[in-house]
Amino acid sequence: MESEDTRTLTMEIPLCFLSKAAVDPLWTNTSLSNGWLTDPALGLIAFWTGTIDLSGYVREMKTFYPMAGIIQQGAFNAEQGGEGSILYTIVSSIPLDPLAVSSAVVGGSGMGLLSLSGQTNQNYDTVLFAESELYVENANITPNAFGIQQPLLNRQTGSLSPTAADTLYVMKMVLPFGAAQTSITIPASRVLLPGKFGTEPDVEYMMRLKRSVELANQV
């Protein structure tokens, strides 16, 4: 890497509130979803997607070298009537499919890791950063009418591999347990990717760019 340009890539993710009757199989009130999406094929799973544009750096033939992945988020998560939930955040150098992401997480793994879902378009290099958070109801708050949750597990994966992709794809997904939830609140969050943009020798850069395009076209 001949020259360096330090940058922190940022993605702002809005808060989300969804609600329904306990007997309903899907969220019926999505007026405060705030850009989060639902799909009948996914049941109560909801997700948000965004992109980070790197095309200007690609035109300058620069490679991004991530140094870390950080998630900042609001004060609390809440869920009424549920059994807990998983929050999964991922930054990928190739497009993300919510069904593939949910299948990988529900299968006990995650994108870029070996899983029962057999997703082959994502690998160690394409998943730059991912974080899985397991939340359960906070039993220390009595009564807990609002359903404030506490984190039980927090795990990170991802390669932080250099990339010549012109776009990074971000997805945040909530995967509730059970089906009797009446509401769920996901706080606003921010994904930070501090790193450096550098200029590689032409051969190395062209090979990295070729690989990025090949992987993106597999989706």
Image: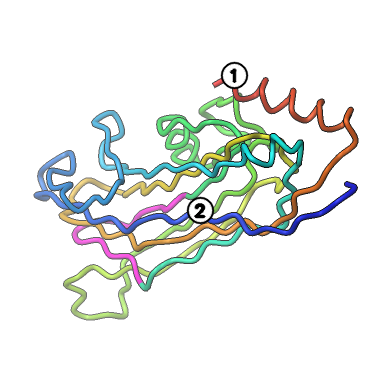
- Residue at numbered disc 2: 132
Disc 1 is placed on an element classified as: helix
The residue mark sitting in front, 1 or 2, is: 1
Q: Residues within 10 Å of mark 2 (few under 14, many from 20)?
A: many
**In the rendered image of this protein, does residue 202 appear above or below residue 24?**
above
Q: Disc 2 marks which amino acid?
A: Ser
In the figure, residue 214 lies in which quadrant? top right
Q: Nearer the viewer, residue 3 or 87?
A: 3
Q: Which residues are magenta?
A: 76-88
Q: Residue at x 61, y 31 (%)?
A: 122
**Real-space Cα distance between discs 1 and 2?**
27 Å
In the figure, residue 75 lies in which quadrant? bottom left
Is 215 in the magenta?
no
118 relative to 87 in the view: left or right? right
Asked if the residues shown at circle 1 and circle 2 are in contact, with their CB atoms under 8 angstroms apart, the answer is no
- Residue at numbered disc 1: 217
Q: Position of residue 43 (x, y in %)?
A: 26, 36
Q: Residues within 10 Å of mark 1 (few under 14, many from 20)?
A: few
Q: State how the image is colored.
A: rainbow
Q: Nearer the viewer, residue 133 or 15?
A: 15
Q: Disc 1 marks which amino acid?
A: Asn
Q: Residue at x 45, y 30 (%)?
A: 97
Q: Position of residue 157 (x, y in %)?
A: 63, 50
Q: Nearer the viewer, residue 215 or 98?
A: 215
**In the rendered image of this protein, does residue 96 appear above or below residue 33?**
above
Q: Mark 2 or mark 1, which is nearer the start of the sequence?
A: 2
Q: Residue at x 74, y 28 (%)?
A: 209
Q: Position of residue 61 (x, y in %)?
A: 76, 36
Q: Position of residue 103 (x, y in %)?
A: 44, 33
7 relative to 181 in the view: left or right? right
12 relative to 119 in the view: left or right? left
